[in-house]
Image (cartoon, rainbow, N blue to C red):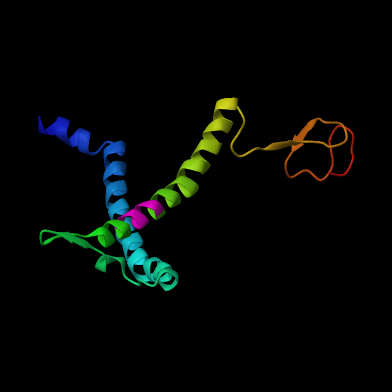
Amino acid sequence: MLKGFRDFVLRGNVVDLAVAVVLGGAFGNVVNTMVKGMITPLIGAFGGQPDFSGIYFSINESKFMIGDFLNALISFLIVASVIYFFVVMPMNKIMSKVKKGERVDPTERTCPECLSQIPVKAGRCKFCTSKV
């Protein structure tokens, strides 16, 4: 029973997932600090409210903290945009090349004169001997 558990824990994907969760939590803290320390005051400079956490309304002495929600929403949007533009888009581009059968790191290119395939680092075409 313990051998099976050890094999499960030491599989690569479980360890990778654990690392991703820890890094995601740390990244979330960095983004939250950036939002509270830089983005919110920047937005507040134009809107007149430098700290959104003070925005609230009350009903029957119950406080509804709209400012905290706005801070969390801004943090979420920043994290989502960073993940989309720096992880999802590049992976989609790589996966589309892989699905088409193209090499992600090409070793050959097309000669502009004779349209034959030559090495990427070639200075002359091996077929028509033109400079490339």
Image point (10%, 62%), residue name:
61
Q: Is residue 29 found left or right of 109 in the rendered image?
A: left
Whether 59 is drawn above or below 43: the answer is above
Decide whether the magenta segment is chiefly helix, strand or loop.
helix
Residue toward you, 63 or 34 = 63
Q: Is residue 48 covered in magenta?
A: no
Q: Position of residue 4 (x, y in %)?
A: 16, 30
Whole-percent x, y for residue 123 in the image: 81, 45
Say above or below: 100 vs 130. above
Q: Residue at x 45, y 70 (%)?
A: 46
The C terminus: image quadrant: top right
Residue 54: quadrant of the picture: bottom left
User: Residue 15, image x and y in percent?
Assistant: 27, 42
Please state the total of marks drawn on the protein image. 0
Magenta part of the protein: which range?
72-77
Instruction: List x then y, in percent, for residue 48.
Output: 39, 72
Image quadrant occupied by the N terminus: top left
Is 124 on the left-hand or right-hand side of 85?
right
From the viewer's perspective, is residue 88 above or below residue 69? above
Q: On the rendered structure, is 10 left or right of 46?
A: left
Q: Residue furthest top?
A: 100
Snapshot quadrant of residue 107: top right
Q: Is residue 75 magenta?
A: yes
Q: Nearer the viewer, residue 131 or 79?
A: 79
- The residue shown at (72%, 41%) is 120
